[in-house]
Image (tube, rainbow, N blue to C red):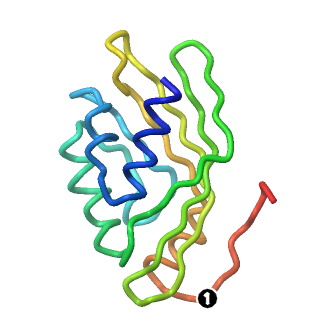
Amino acid sequence: MKDRIRAAFRDFGRGEPGTLVALLAPDVAYTVIGTTALSGTLHGPDQVLTRLLRPLAAALATPLALEIVSTTAEGDRVVVEARGRATLVSGAPYDNTYCFVFRFNDAGQIQYLTEHWNTWHAYRQLFNNFEVEPAHPLD
């Protein structure tokens, strides 16, 4: 499971979200923590594409490259700590820290996915475009 997630993150950083979307169960529940325009629980791959991935891509001039810092797997769960970097359409850099919690079903598909991120930082960079320094707890 860890290798499949690594491949999905690699392709996502190349602007190819199809590998990640193909891993999602038809009835996946994808929760983005926080109160941003992208936050909430999305149901099914179509909602993930239309309410998260496409709006995020529209805010970015370059694909969001996710550098995996660590991966932990136990049972049907995989937890990934990552750093994300991209360039906003304004030309400003975007970087943030993430923790993804994947839970797989018996068919090897992602049934539940929770994305934790620095929402204050993301809100200010993605939606307000104020200059801020993000937290770097992994440095």
Q: How many marks?
A: 1
Q: Position of residue 48 (x, y in %)?
A: 28, 47
- Furthest residue to the right? 139
Secondary structure of the residue carrying tag 1 is loop
Q: Position of residue 60 (x, y in %)?
A: 37, 75
Looking at the picture, which amino acid does disc 1 mark? Glu
Lateral position of residue 139 relative to residue 115, left or right? right
- Furthest residue to the top? 106
Image quadrant where residue 93 sits: bottom right
Residue at x 48% of width, y 23% of height: 1
Query: Where 79 falls versus 128 (above or below)?
Result: above
Lateral position of residue 49 relative to residue 84, left or right? left
Look at the image and tell me in which quarter the C terminus lies: bottom right
Query: Where 105 falls versus 130 (above or below)?
Result: above
Q: Position of residue 69 (x, y in %)?
A: 67, 47
Q: Position of residue 52 (x, y in %)?
A: 32, 56
- Dot 1, how many residues are within 10 Å of its Cα: few (below 14), some (14-19), or many (20+)? few
Of residues 121 and 63, the one nearer the viewer is 63
Lateral position of residue 34 relative to residue 38, left or right? right
Residue at x 30% of width, y 53% of height: 16
**Which residue is under mark 1?**
131
Of residues 4 and 108, the one nearer the viewer is 4
Image quadrant where residue 78 sits: top right
Query: Where 45 falls versus 36 (above or below)?
Result: above
